[in-house]
Image (cartoon, rainbow, N blue to C red):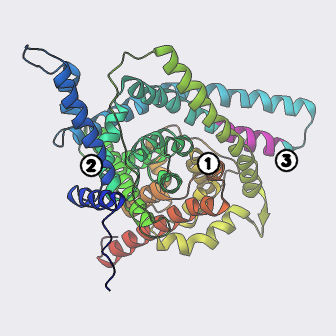
């Protein structure tokens, strides 16, 4: 006797229907569920509310149609980001000069005190010319941009614009099988990558949070912007017609930012298809209403929770780096400083990627804080024994050209500065947020490999074509 055919259970029917919905919606069941919920809610609202007046969109809905449109959404984001960068760079110049004047002026007072106390020269060198001078560089270069960028960023957040940025970029991150909230952590990285890593807490999925942590370094922080701006102004802006130097340099910086964002997407896609496989979580984002910003809260969150938090970590890391750099610059072996020997040893590798040994060594010694890369480089080129400051870009240009810099050196230096390993402050934040030495090492190794690979390809291609 043949077995009776079992009827299909309600659960099986529900599963089959869910699979059908998933296929019809392009593979995203979560999006289909959310869309159905809102459609039902809209139907109920129409039945419950009787209003014969003609429905018209409010100003906020009309503004959303512009800010989140496929045609204008991305250009507006790019323009706003450029404006924030311009305000940050222009606004930070004078405060940086004032803070540097005060801090480096106090260095002279410290020197007098050391002389009065009869302290040995080596102790004065380590503590004043090394440790204190590095701190002065980091604070004067890092504090003003952060004190401008973070309030502007927090203001956009308070106004309700940043959720619109996440909405615009969600589809791109979803194609990478990452979370749309990564757009917000990426934007935070423009101020400081350490703050960007900390902000990854808003991502619920552990897999997607790791992707955001590992790739946050590919957007340049304000510690790298001084180097990028100086090199772009000298070698790209300087080659332009008089009066257009700033415009050309700004275009180069914008192009570098777009390269960093593109690498972020590429690295996120690669991670989500290899060691961090998985489906993207559905970003159910209800756009909040536009709000009048609370300036007291904006200042407090941006200055206390972000600026001072990041600056404290950077100072903690930069202080010993300055002391070690002074020791390496003043310890001689066979008539050459240790820095000179290390640069000679690194020169073949540096040359292969379009740099030289001194540039590569400056990035290595600048691991604790990106702000001290250029001072270390000048110290090495000038054999001064301590980190020096330059009075003008023209003076910096003369030093670099006299030490063999070409357009290829400038391009590779900017690319390496954009893509290379995170600073120790960011790595420390990555360890605290991930709780894993393995993923902290990945956050260091992945940008390092990409930076070397990109610069090697650019340098060898230019030389092979006879362009350099």
Residue 94 to residue 369: above or below: above
**Going from the N terminus, do you reach mark 2 or mark 3 first?**
2
2 or 402, nearer to the observer: 2
Q: Quadrant of residue 411?
A: bottom left
Residue 22: x and y in percent read 27, 58
Crowding at mark 2 (Cα within 10 Å: few <14, some 14-19, many 20+): some
* Residue drawn at x 73%, y 31% as measured from the top left: 107
The residue to which callout 1 is attached is 433
Q: Which residues are magenta?
A: 124-136
Q: Position of residue 412 (x, y in %)?
A: 42, 62
Per the image, the residue denoted by label 2 is: 32
* Labels 1 and 2: the sequence-earlier one: 2
On residue 122, which mark appears? 3
To which quarter of the image does residue 164 belong? top left
SS type, badge 1? helix
Lower position in the chain sequence, tag 3 or tag 1: 3
Q: Is residue 354 above or below residue 312?
A: below
Dot 3 falls on a residue whose secondary structure is helix
């Amino acid at each position: 006797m043949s077995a009776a055919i079992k009827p299909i259970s309600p659960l099986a029917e529900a599963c089959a229907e869910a699979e059908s919905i998933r296929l019809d919606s392009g593979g995203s069941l979560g999006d289909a569920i959310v869309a159905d919920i809102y459609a039902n809610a809209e139907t109920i609202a129409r039945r419950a509310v009787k209003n014969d007046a003609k429905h018209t969109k409010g100003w906020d809905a009309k503004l959303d149609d512009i800010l989140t449109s496929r045609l204008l959404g991305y250009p507006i984001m790019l323009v706003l980001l450029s404006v924030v960068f311009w305000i940050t760079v222009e606004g930070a110049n004078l405060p940086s000069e004032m803070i540097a004047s005060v801090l480096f002026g106090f260095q002279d007072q410290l020197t007098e005190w050391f002389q009065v106390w009869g302290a040995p020269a080596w102790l004065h060198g380590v503590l004043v010319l090394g440790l204190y001078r590095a701190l002065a560089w980091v604070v004067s270069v890092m504090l003003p941009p952060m004190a401008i960028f973070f309030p502007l960023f927090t203001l956009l957040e308070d106004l309700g614009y940043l959720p619109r940025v996440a909405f615009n970029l969600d589809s791109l991150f979803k194609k990478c099988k990452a979370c749309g909230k990564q757009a917000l952590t990426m934007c935070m990285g423009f101020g400081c990558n350490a703050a960007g890593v900390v902000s990854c807490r808003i991502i619920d999925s552990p897999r997607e949070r790791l992707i955001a942590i590992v790739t946050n370094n590919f957007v340049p922080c304000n510690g790298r912007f001084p180097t990028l701006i100086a090199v772009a102004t000298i070698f790209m802006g300087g080659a332009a017609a008089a009066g257009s130097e700033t415009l050309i340099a700004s275009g180069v910086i914008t192009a570098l930012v777009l390269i960093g964002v593109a690498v972020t997407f590429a690295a996120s896609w690669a991670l989500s298809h290899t060691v961090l496989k998985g489906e993207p979580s559905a970003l159910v984002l209800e756009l909040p209403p536009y709000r009048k910003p609370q300036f007291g809260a904006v200042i407090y969150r941006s200055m206390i929770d972000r600026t001072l938090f990041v600056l404290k970590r950077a100072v903690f890391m930069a202080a010993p780096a300055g002391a070690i750099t002074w020791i390496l610059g003043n310890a001689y072996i066979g008539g050459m400083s240790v820095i000179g020997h290390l640069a000679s040893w690194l020169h073949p590798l540096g040359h292969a990627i379009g740099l030289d040994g001194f540039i590569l060594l400056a990035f290595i010694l600048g691991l604790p804080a990106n702000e001290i890369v250029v001072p270390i480089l000048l110290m090495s080129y000038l054999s001064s024994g301590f980190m020096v400051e330059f009075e003008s870009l023209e003076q910096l240009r003369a030093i670099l050209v006299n030490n063999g810099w070409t357009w290829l050196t400038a391009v590779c230096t900017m690319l390496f500065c954009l893509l290379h390993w995170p600073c120790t402050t960011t790595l420390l934040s990555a360890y605290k947020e991930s709780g894993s030495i393995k993923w902290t090492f990945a956050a260091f190794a992945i940008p390092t490999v990409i930076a070397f690979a990109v610069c090697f390809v650019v340098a060898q291609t230019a030389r092979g074509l006879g362009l350099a």
